[in-house]
Image: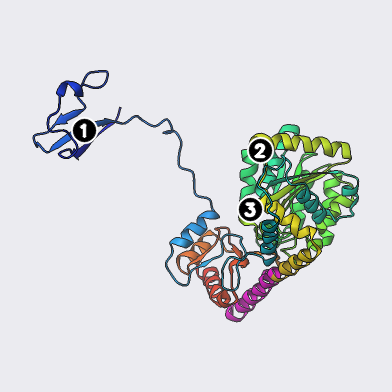
Amino acid sequence: MASSMLSLGWTSLLPREINKDKLKLGPSGSNPFLRTKSLSRVTMSVSVKPSRFEGITMAPPDPILGVSEAFKADTNELKLNLGVGAYRTEELQPYVLNVVKKAENLMLERGDNKEYLPIEGLAAFNKATAELLFGAGHPVIKEQKVATIQGLSGTGSLRLAAALIERYFPGAKVLISAPTWGNHKNIFNDAKVPWSEYRYYDPKTIGLDFEGMIQDIKEAPEGSFILLHGCAHNPTGIDPTPEQWVKIADVIQEKNHIPFFDVAYQGFASGSLDEDAASVRLFAERGMEFFVAQSYSKNLGLYAERIGAINVVCSSADAATRVKSQLKRIARPMYSNPPVHGARIVANVVGDATMFGEWKAEMEMMAGRIKTVRQRLYDSLVSKDKSGKDWSFILKQIGMFSFTGLNKAQSDNMTNKWHVYMTKDGRISLAGLSMAKCEYLADAIIDSYHNVS
């Protein structure tokens, strides 16, 4: 047993005379206070037990959130945080949507309470979120074929679905794109759901490896879950074309796979709620059964409210009822019920024609600013780089992210030399870039690409 010696001054703490008999404490009767030669000091021996948690190792830092921590520690005035996918204004400040402020004021005026929600969440939110995704008049909604429950944003909604897969589709594998959002693998690992990757990104073209993607989906075991990004693929920003989505749906149907959409950017990618939901609606129109996880972190700026949903499209209303009951059963011991504040914001915004219109206008503004920054970055790269390299992939990508094609060493150079913080796979968040910083970023990218191997 380890022990440490703590030397303390006791002149003012101990009575003038100490009864040694009363200091015989502990099972051995030994005196824990041992006099030293100095009359003004007493040495105390303190026993320290080994921790029950000695076997727990230090976890590695989160590759995305760790970027922000490193950015904050940097004192260089030129530093730029392009790691975390959170929208910033031209002044690079967080942005709270005006329509969100209005919805919150409405809640205060009404005096909404803070009572627990049901396990499945706020009914008005669930109705609104399904209608936003599929369209209010869609047959799957009219025929009550969608099981929707409010989840803890996109991550929590994905985790609920993963738990349902583990419980009711034992041994089924989930195929995820290579690359994908870093937390996808964590979610399925934590839920003990096996996964593998399908080809997606082609480093030669910095574009979509469509043929590889189709081949891998075809070769997957029948009945696999195919995780698809509904729009604005993270991290690449590379989406299939409408024609390619049709082919993807064909192959998934032929192989009897189950599509699993992650929709984190509806309305935020193109500026149109309907356009960004087109891939999901294509599959719904075919009468397929599938999962859709939703998030309102980006399109309503509700990052910290953790508002999202998991939708399961079923072949019948009866199946949807049973699926919903099991999703609730999974949620109950996991977090009991979801938060109300953000759910009311969504329900208020979608349920009021005026606020809904204002929201769409703000989404168009945010998406438009990112498109403008994307164009300015491209223009800066073309004007500054005289090597003849084709930078057009920057414009072909969509959404808040751009996959630069930089490798880890080059990304490290971006940070170490240029103070540009980004993920090590070469992804940058254009939502954190301003027009004023585009030329500086172009210089950093050109230097890293040409001078670091």
On whether residue 79 falls in the magenta region, the answer is no
Callout 2 crowding tier (Cα within 10 Å): few <14, some 14–19, many ≥20: some
- Residue nearest the observer in this picture, 372 or 122: 122
The quadrant of the picture occupied by the N terminus is top left
Q: In the image, which residues are magenta?
A: 366-395
452 on left or right of 16: right
Residue carrying label 2: 336
- Residue nearest the observer in this picture, 243 or 72: 72
Q: Are marks 2 and 1 in contact (CB under 8 Å)?
A: no
Between discs 2 and 1, the one toward the N terminus: 1
- Residue nearest the observer in this picture, 154 or 347: 347
Residue 70: where, in percent of width, then height? 47, 59
| Residue pictured at 76% horizontal, 43% vertical | 225
Determine which quarter of the picture holds residue 275: bottom right
Residue 122: where, in percent of width, then height? 74, 47
- Above or below for 181 versus 387: above
Q: Which mark identifies residue 305?
A: 3
Residue carrying label 1: 44
Determine which quarter of the picture holds residue 376: bottom right
Between discs 3 and 1, the one toward the N terminus: 1
170 on left or right of 381: right
Residue 35: where, in percent of width, then height? 13, 31
Q: Are marks 3 and 1 in contact (CB under 8 Å)?
A: no
The alpha-carbon separation of the residues under discs 3 and 2 comes to 16 Å
